Image (cartoon, helix red, strand yellow):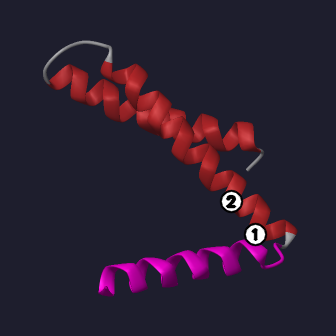
Amino acid sequence: MKIVTTASLVALIGVLQACAPVTAEQQRSRNCATGAIGGAIAGGVIGNQIGGGTGQTIATAAGAAAGAAAGQNVAGC
């Protein structure tokens, strides 16, 4: 019963949050975050395809960093 009540409360808060007016600055911030996160994921996946062992780990990290920067650039941040 507690789980259902908690889940319902969280869903209600989410619905009310979605109805709140969003300023242009808040929307820009969301776009920047989405671009950075999406870019980091894509860059990390691509970087992970390169090399092996320690080199692969470094390539994954570098790909994630480069992808985050590119994602923010695409989002206009």
4 up-or-down from 41: above or below: below
Amino acid residing under circle 2:
Arg
Q: Main secondary structure of the magenta part?
A: helix
Identify the residue at horizontal 32%, vertical 15% (top origin): 49
User: For residue 45, what is the image quadrant?
Assistant: top left
Question: Mark number for residue 76?
Answer: none
| Displayed quadrant of residue 38 | top right
Q: Nearer the viewer, residue 77 or 7?
A: 7
- State yes or no: residue 2 in magenta: yes
Q: To which quarter of the image does residue 59 belong? A: top left
Q: Which residues are magenta?
A: 1-22
Q: Report helix, strand or loop for mark 1.
A: helix
Q: Which one is in front, 13 or 76?
A: 13
Residue 8: % across, % down: 49, 80
- Tell me where residue 13 appears, x and y as whole percent: 59, 82
Dot 1 surroundings within 10 Å: few (below 14), some, or many (20 or more)?
A: few
Residue drawn 27% across the image and 29% down it? 58
- Callouts 1 and 2 close, C-beta under 8 Å: yes
Amino acid bearing label 1: Gln
Q: In the displayed image of the protein, which residue is found farthest to the front?
A: 1
Which quarter shows the N terminus? bottom left
Label 2 crowd bin: few (<14), some (14–19), many (20+), radius 10 Å: few
Residue at numbered disc 2:
30
On residue 26, the disc is: 1
Up/down of 71 relative to 30, above or below = above
